[in-house]
Amino acid sequence: MPATPKQKERAIDVEDQSAISDQEEEQSSASDIASPSTSTQKKKKKSKASKALKVLRGDSEIPQQLIDHVLDRVKAERSNESAEVNQENVREALEKLKIMDVVKGKAGIGGHNQKDMGQHKFWGTQPVPQPGEGPPIDDGYIEPSRPRVEVRQDAYPLPKDFEWSILDLSDPQQNKEVYDLLALTPPGYHKEWHIGVRVSSNKKLVAFISGVPMTIRVRKHQIPVAEINYLCVHKKLRSKRLAPVLIKEVTRQVHLKGVFQAIYTAGVVVPTPVSVCRYHHRLINVQKLIDIKFAYVPRSMTLARMIRVNKVPSTFAVPGLREMEEHDVPQVADLFTRYMRRFDLAPLYDLDEVKHQFMSGMGTGVIGDGGPGRRVGQVTWTYVVEDPDTHKITDFFSFYSLPSTVINNAKFPVLEAAYLFYYATETAFVDDAQENGNLKKRLEAVVGDALVVANKANFDVFNALTLMDNVPILQDLKFGIGDGILNFYLYNWRTAPLAGMNSEGGVPAGKGVGVVML
C-alpha cells in the first residue's frame, strides 16, 4: 500500500498534526522523559498484560460484521489476493489501525491524533459542531453574524519577542518567504487574510496562516466563506501554542470583512468533520516509487510485471482534446457550474474565478521550457474537449502539481506528485447516463487522458480523493487505496454529514463533496 506523501512542499516547516488538534504542550524536562514514574510503568505493564490476555481469549471489540464486510470487499475487488486473507489477519490489521477509535471519533486512521474529542480545549470554545451532538434538524449558522463594531478590533496578543505581520504577496521578497502559492491571490482576495508571525528582533517569518474569500453551496444554502489553508509554524516554536492564536487572529480578520463562515481541511480529527475522504494513488514512475519506499512490490507480483501493469498509454483516448485557452473560459464556466450542482458541497465561481483557478497557474513560455510536458513555473494543467463540428466544449479536466521533498535521498530528492483537481462532462446530463454506465465510461476516458498528460510531464504519481464522481472510476484506472485521510470542516455552520469515502443518507460515496482545496 502506498504511503501518503507530504501534502505540500513549503518554504518553512509545516505545523505538525498536534498543532491543529491543540496538543502542543510545553516540552517536558529531560528528567521527566528519562525517568517515568513507577506508577506509570506499572500501568503500562498492566495495559500490555491486559492486551495479551484479550488476544489469548480471542476477545475483540471489532464487530464480526465489520470483519465479514472487509473480507467480502477483498474477495470482490482483489480476487488475486483473496486466498491470502482470512478473518485472523483482517482482525489483526483493523486492530493495528485502531479502527474502533476512528469509529468512535477518538482518533484518525492508524491511531494518529488519538485524543478524546471532549479534551480539545481550543475547539471546544469555537462555533463548530461538538462531539455528542445529534444530527441537525436543519442547516444553518451556529452563531449569528455580528456588525463590524462588535468584532474585536485589536489583534490577539502574541508571546514575548514575536509580532504580527500582514504579508503583501505582491512584494516578491515577501512572496518568496511564504512560497509561491497560487491559491492565495484569487479575484477579490484580502491581504489582511495573509497573516504571519515574525521574530521582533530580526523580522524572520516563523509562522503563517492564510484565508481567501469564496462562495460555496452547502446543499440548498449559498454562503460566503473564507477558505483557510497553509497553517505553518516553525518546528522550534511548537511549544509556544501559536496555532490557536493564528486561527483566532485570522478568524478576527475574516469577521472584520463581514464573513462569519469558513471551510478548511486537515488530516487530523478535531470537532467535527462534515465529511471524510480517502486518498488514492495511481503509480506512474513505479521504479522510483519503489526506490523511495512510497510503494512496494506485492508478494504476488514481480517488479517487471508491476511496471508493465501500471504503464500509462502514450496517446489520448478522447478525440478533440487540447489545452484550455482563454476564449474557452465562458464555456468551461458554464459546464463547470452545471456539473457541480450534482454535489451537496460545491464552490460557486464566476468567470474571473474560473480563469484564475484553471489558467493562472499554467506558467510562462511554451511547453517544454520547464522540462518535458511543462512550462516554466507551471502549477496547473487544464485540458478541454472540443467538438470539431459545433466547437462546443463537451468535457474538461484539470490537475495541479504539489511536489514533496524526499528526506535523505540524494538520488531522488523530490517526489513529483499530481493531484486531480476539477473536471466535468456533458455526458452527465444525458438521460440514464449514470444508470447505463455511460457516465462512468466517459469519465474513465477523460481522467485517463489526464494520466497521459501527467506522464508526459514526468510526474511520479497521480493522486485523487474519494469525492465528486471519482469513486466509481478509481479502481478501473488502477488507483490504489492510500493511507491518507482528509477531513473536511465547516466553521460556524451545521449540516448533516456529507458523502465522502462512505455513502451518507442515501447519497453515494463521493457525491457529497465537490470542493477540492489546493
Image (cartoon, rainbow, N blue to C red):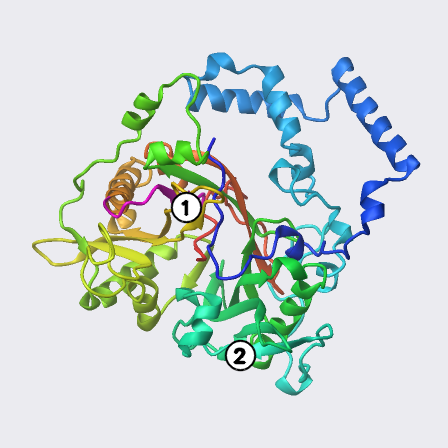
Mark on residue 103?
none
In the rendered image, residue 297, in percent from the top left (x then y), is placed at 41, 24
- Nearer to us of marks 1 and 2 is 1
Residue kind at label 1, given as amino acid type = Pro
First to last magenta residue range: 456-469
- Residue holding disc 2: 192
Q: Residue furthest left?
A: 389
The residue sitting at 47% across, 16% down in the picture is: 82
The residue sitting at 44% across, 65% down in the picture is: 179
Tell me the element at label 2: helix
Residue 214 in view (yes/no): no
Q: Are marks 1 and 2 in contact (CB under 8 Å)?
A: no
Foreground residue among 416 and 203: 203
In the rendered image, residue 293, in percent from the top left (x then y), is placed at 46, 34
Residue kind at label 2, given as amino acid type = Glu
Gap between marks 1 and 2 measured at Cα: 35 Å
Relative to 154, say whether 420 is above or below: above
The residue sitting at 24% across, 40% down in the picture is: 445
Is 486 magenta? The answer is no
